Image (cartoon, rainbow, N blue to C red):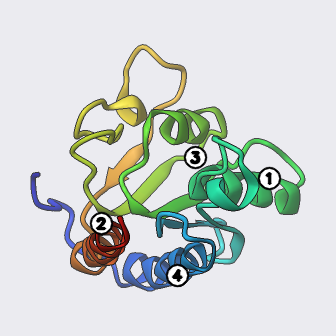
């Protein structure tokens, strides 16, 4: 995947640390360790999420969707204009679509997802010009840490099988 052409903003790295902490929560229920935070325009964390599909049996319980839902509740609006979605793995099509519908102007992510990514890998939902909202994409923030967490999880899953 291409390197991050925009460099690394220290705030993005700090926020990714929060998303990585959230990703670890998913491990408690044997869920894929993906974490997300929605940060408001003033830098306040409005919503945090981690994968809860296994815990809830809900196929839409992805980290990003849960963080967006929680942020909308705190903000009192589904429009999350001025917010940043930070996630440890490139969003899938569903999560990228949810970010577009929430009017998120910026998505920061860690590891690329060459199988299901929708922020430039397989699809590019976030920057699709035919949609009514476009999103700035900042990839590769703390990419190694994010990728390592996933690699370790799936290696452990294979050993159990």
Alpha carbon of mark 3 to alpha carbon of mark 1: how far?
11 Å
User: Residue 24, labelled with which disc?
Assistant: 4
Q: Secondary structure at mark 4?
A: helix
Location of mark 2 (residue) = 158
Q: Residues within 10 Å of mark 4 (few under 14, many from 20)?
A: some
Alpha carbon of mark 2 to alpha carbon of mark 3: how far?
36 Å
Alpha carbon of mark 4 to alpha carbon of mark 1: how far?
23 Å
Q: Quadrant of residue 49?
A: bottom right
Image location of residue 118, percent across then percent down: 36, 37
Image location of residue 128, percent across then percent down: 37, 24
Q: Residues within 10 Å of mark 3 (few under 14, many from 20)?
A: many
Badge 4 or badge 1: first in the primary sequence: 4
Badge 1 or badge 2: first in the primary sequence: 1
Alpha carbon of mark 1 to alpha carbon of mark 2: how far?
37 Å
Q: Secondary structure at mark 3?
A: loop
User: Residue 104, labelled with which disc?
Assistant: 3
Frontmost residue, 158 versus 47: 158
- The residue lying furthest to the front in this view is 161
Q: Quadrant of residue 5?
A: bottom left
Badge 4 or badge 3: first in the primary sequence: 4
Image location of residue 68, percent across then percent down: 69, 53
**Up-down: is 119 above or below 111?**
above
Q: Residues within 10 Å of mark 2 (few under 14, many from 20)?
A: few
User: Residue 50, labelled with which disc?
Assistant: none
Q: Secondary structure at mark 2?
A: helix
């Amino acid at each position: 995947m291409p390197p991050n052409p925009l460099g690394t903003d220290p705030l993005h790295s700090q926020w990714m640390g929060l998303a990585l902490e959230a990703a670890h929560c998913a491990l408690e229920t044997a869920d894929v360790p993906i974490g997300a935070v929605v940060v408001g325009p003033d830098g306040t964390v409005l919503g945090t999420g981690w994968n809860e599909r296994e815990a809830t049996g809900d196929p839409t319980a992805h980290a990003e969707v849960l963080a967006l839902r929680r942020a909308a509740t705190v903000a009192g609006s589904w429009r999350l204009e001025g917010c940043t979605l930070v996630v440890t793995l490139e969003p899938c099509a569903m999560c990228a679509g949810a970010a577009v519908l929430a009017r998120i102007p910026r998505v920061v992510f860690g590891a690329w997802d060459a199988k299901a990514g929708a922020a430039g890998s397989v699809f590019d939902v976030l920057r699709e010009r035919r949609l009514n909202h476009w999103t700035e994409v900042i990839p590769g923030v703390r990419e190694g840490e994010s990728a390592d967490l996933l690699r370790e999880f799936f290696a452990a899953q294979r050993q159990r099988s």
